[in-house]
């Protein structure tokens, strides 16, 4: 783990199977699940929204189904990815997979 990553991400990653491959779904689940300082004062609704989205992604992977996300879900995930992961190249790869139009800006 790089020293610049948030402590919450480091703690979260320590509990994850190190042999598991990093996939787009896994990266999105991590970004949605890691607690950020900004999350401390939020109410239950945003946390439930993120939890429901994690479940939706997980179910899709388990069932082998493709997943269609609402634009607000994609925006939420992109924002979380940018806050959780510090490496610009990783953020870019994840965001471009979620929203290819971002590469045109």
Image: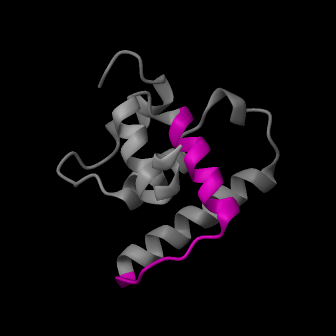
Tell me where residue 56 appears, x and y as whole percent. Answer: 54, 72
The main secondary structure of the magenta stretch is: helix
Q: Residue at x 47, y 54 (%)?
A: 28
Tell me, yes or no, whether the highlighted magenta stretch contains residue 80: yes
- The region drawn magenta spans 63-83
Q: Which quadrant would residue 87 be assigned to in this image?
A: top left
In the displayed structure image, the side of residue 50 where residue 64 appears, left or right: left
Give how far across and how far down residue 23 sits, in percent: 31, 57
Find the residue positioned furthest to the left.
19
Answer above or below: position of 33 versus 11: below
Percent position of residue 34, x then y: 53, 41
Compared to residue 5, the image places residue 24 above or below, namely below
| In-front residue for pair 98/66 | 98
State the quadrant of the C terminus: top right
The residue that appears at 41% across and 57% down in the rendered structure is 97
Query: What residue sits 28% from the left and 52% below the top?
Result: 22
Image location (x, y in percent) of residue 86: 44, 27
Q: Nearer the viewer, residue 101 or 19?
A: 101
């Amino acid at each position: 783990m790089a020293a610049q990553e948030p402590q919450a991400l480091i703690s979260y990653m320590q509990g994850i199977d190190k042999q598991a491959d990093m996939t787009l779904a896994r990266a999105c689940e991590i970004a949605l699940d890691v607690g950020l300082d900004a999350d401390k004062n939020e109410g239950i609704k945003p946390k439930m929204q993120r939890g429901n989205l994690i479940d939706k992604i997980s179910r899709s992977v388990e069932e082998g189904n493709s997943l269609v996300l609402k634009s607000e879900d994609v925006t939420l995930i992109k924002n979380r990815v940018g806050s959780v992961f510090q490496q610009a190249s990783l953020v870019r790869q994840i965001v471009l997979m979620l929203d290819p139009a971002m590469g045109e800006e």
